[in-house]
Structures are given as C-alpha cells and as structure tokens.
Image (cartoon, rainbow, N blue to C red):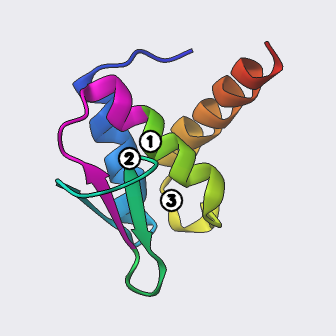
Amino acid sequence: MFKYNRYTLGKIEEIFAQLGYKVRYEKGQFQSGYCIVENRKIAVINKFYEVEGRINVLLDILNQIEVDEALLDDKHRAFYRKLRRARASDEEE
C-alpha cells in the first residue's frame, strides 16, 4: 500500500512526465474531476481537489491510458507496478 501524501503525488506526476504527459491543475466543468486531451498528452485535473483526490484521479487516468513501461526508469517502473498491485488489491476487496 502507499500513503496519500504530497510525496506520492509527486512520484505519480513524475511517472506522467516520463510517459510524455503534462499534468495541469485548473478549474473547469469536469464531470469526473479530470479531462484528458489525448492528442496532446495533457491531463487536466480539478484544482480544488485535495491531495488524496488528485492521487485517485491520476490513478484512474493511468488505468485508462496505455502505459509503455519501457519509457519509465527503473525506480519509477517499480513504483508504477506497486501502484498497479495496490489498485488491483483494492478492487478485489
């Protein structure tokens, strides 16, 4: 499991950066709390979300996009796999 704190949020944002995505926090009329601009690899997150909400939204996006683990360095690849395992065990419960 991982902790919902700014450090974890930063590591997830780094994963997005290595995948070529820009993460922006802005206000908007998002039904799900975020918007993905596919052709430009931009994820726009509701800026009023707290850290836990931001992490959950970014994890939802990671589940939706195709992640090429070859783009991640070893440290981030291991963290990404840890996130996937944690998410899978949460869904089983």
Q: Is residue 71 above or below residue 57?
A: below
Does residue 78 sit above or below 82 in this rendering? Answer: below
Please name the residue that numbered disc 2 is placed on: 33
Amino acid type, mark 3: Leu
Which element type, helix, strand or loop, lies under badge 1? Answer: helix
Q: Is residue 26 left or right of residue 39?
A: left
Q: CA distance from mark 3 to mark 1?
A: 20 Å
> Callout 2 environment at 10 Å: few (<14), some (14 to 19), or many (20+)?
some
The residue that label 1 is drawn on is: 57
**Numbered label attached to residue 72:** 3
CB under 8 Å between discs 2 and 3? no
Q: Is residue 24 left or right of residue 76?
A: left
The magenta-colored residue range is 42-55
Locate the C terminus by quadrant.
Answer: top right
Q: Nearer the viewer, residue 25 or 27?
A: 27
> Position of 93 compared to 82: left or right?
right
Specify whether residue 87 is painted magenta: no
Q: Secondary structure at mark 3?
A: loop
Residue at x 37% of width, y 19% of height: 4
Q: Nearer the N terminus, badge 2 or badge 1?
A: 2
Q: Amino acid at mark 2?
A: Gly
